[in-house]
């Protein structure tokens, strides 16, 4: 594995999050590295989204400053703070304003203004073209958002995170309800972000997608870490067993498991294999292939 393991970008030290009587996260120790895709998996309610929301500043750990940024204990009090730290997030059920076009939705709440404080459409469209080119997504800038496919909306949500050139990108089930081809596009794109040295946290319960791109897999169960592995050193059986909280031997002969395995092979064929993780000598160049005509 070529990820730089020496200096975590972010670190959770014994993070717990309690809602009333419910302990959503219990004593989580987790490091996040540049140039790495970390997959968070676990059953419904395991605490995956809560981890992301702590990093994004939407939920506060019970113990103040139990999150470190570049080794410095930090209080992240909201999206504004996390943006300042170079963290961007795409949450589950990303919402857009149906009555606005693609550009307006990209900049919602962060519109660019000219010197007279008027909204600067031309500058916003230039910037929109730049970020959409990065996700290789041929989406017309003036299209009403309601005309986009599910996959295009997902790409737009990811593109929106790139406006601030973040160091860390949090993705909560970005491939949920996408077609096979759209999923492959999103996964290929996530790999490009890794090559550019970004730290990616990828929540996903589709194990073929996880095994196709993640460098490290962390299993959450009932708010605790129930397993942490380099993808190259673990197996489907082990991850499924840790998600379910049972012995991995119980999954060895299941036909469902075998069909999942063959899906993994199909997924790997679809995703661009030329890409490789960033090395310690520095992130690789990003190459994009968007068609300008479409913008
Ligand atoms: N704002 C909140 N108030 C109260 N309880 C919450 C809140 N947010 C999350 N929880 C609870 O914390 C636990 C973890 O929730 P979380 O959303 O992190 O799970 P998850 O692993 O993302 O699940 P899913 O796969 O369904 O998205 C759940 O029991 C959930 O009901
Ligand atoms: Mg969730």
Image (cartoon, rainbow, N blue to C red):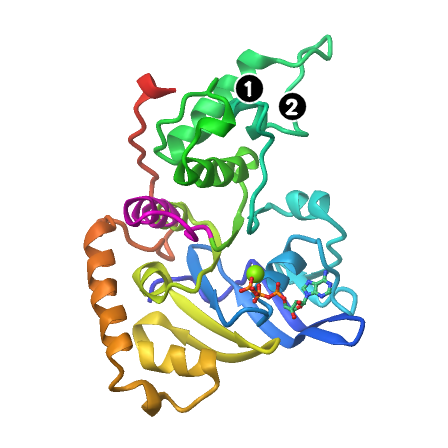
Q: Position of residue 275 (x, y in %)?
A: 27, 49
Boundaries of the magenta span? 174-190
Q: Quadrant of the C terminus?
A: top left
Crowding at dot 2, Cα within 10 Å, few <14 / some 14-19 / many 20+, comes out as some
Q: Main secondary structure of the magenta part?
A: helix
Task: Tell me the SS state at disc 1.
Answer: helix
Residue at x 42% of width, y 58% of height: 37
When asked about the image quadrant of residue 27, the answer is bottom right
Residue at x 41% of width, y 51% of height: 175
Residue at x 66% of width, y 14% of height: 119
Q: Foreground residue, 180 or 77?
A: 180
Crowding at dot 1, Cα within 10 Å, few <14 / some 14-19 / many 20+, comes out as many
Is 202 magenta? The answer is: no
Give the vertical position of 111 relative to 180 (above or below): above
Left or right of residue 52: residue 79: right
Give the vertical position of 248 relative to 31 (above or below): below
**Residue under label 2:** 111
Q: CA distance from mark 2 to mark 1?
A: 7 Å
Q: Are marks 2 and 1 in contact (CB under 8 Å)?
A: yes
Q: Residue furthest top?
A: 116
Give the vertical position of 48 relative to 142 (above or below): below
**Residue under label 1:** 124
- Work out whether mark 2 precedes mark 1 in sequence or the reverse, and give the earlier one: 2
Q: Is residue 262 visible?
A: yes
């Amino acid at each position: 594995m070529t990820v730089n393991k020496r200096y975590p970008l972010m670190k959770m030290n014994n993070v717990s999050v309690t809602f009333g009587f419910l302990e959503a996260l219990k004593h989580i120790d987790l490091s996040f590295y540049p140039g790495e895709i970390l997959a968070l998996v676990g059953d419904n309610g395991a605490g995956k989204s809560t981890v992301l929301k702590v990093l994004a500043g939407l939920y506060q750990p019970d113990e103040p400053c139990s999150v470190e940024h570049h080794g410095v204990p930090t209080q992240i009090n909201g999206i504004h703070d996390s943006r300042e730290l170079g963290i961007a997030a795409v949450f589950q059920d990303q919402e857009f304003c149906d009555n606005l076009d693609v550009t307006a939705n990209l900049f919602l709440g962060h519109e660019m203004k000219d010197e007279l404080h008027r909204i600067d459409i031309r500058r916003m469209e230039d910037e929109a073209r730049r970020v959409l080119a990065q996700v290789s997504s041929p989406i017309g800038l003036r299209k009403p958002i309601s005309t986009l496919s599910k996959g295009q909306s997902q790409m737009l949500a990811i593109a929106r995170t790139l406006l601030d050139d973040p160091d860390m990108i949090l993705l909560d089930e970005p491939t949920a309800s996408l077609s096979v081809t759209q999923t492959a596009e999103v996964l290929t794109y996530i790999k490009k972000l890794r090559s550019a040295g970004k730290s990616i946290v990828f929540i996903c319960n589709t194990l073929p997608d996880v095994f196709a791109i993640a460098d490290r897999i962390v299993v959450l169960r009932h708010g605790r870490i129930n397993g942490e592995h380099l993808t190259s050193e673990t197996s489907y059986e082990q991850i499924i067993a840790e998600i379910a909280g049972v012995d991995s031997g119980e999954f060895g002969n299941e036909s469902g498991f075998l069909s999942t395995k063959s899906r993994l092979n199909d997924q790997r064929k679809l995703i661009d294999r030329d890409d490789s993780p960033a090395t310690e000598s520095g992130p690789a160049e990003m190459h994009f292939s968007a068609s300008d005509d479409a913008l």
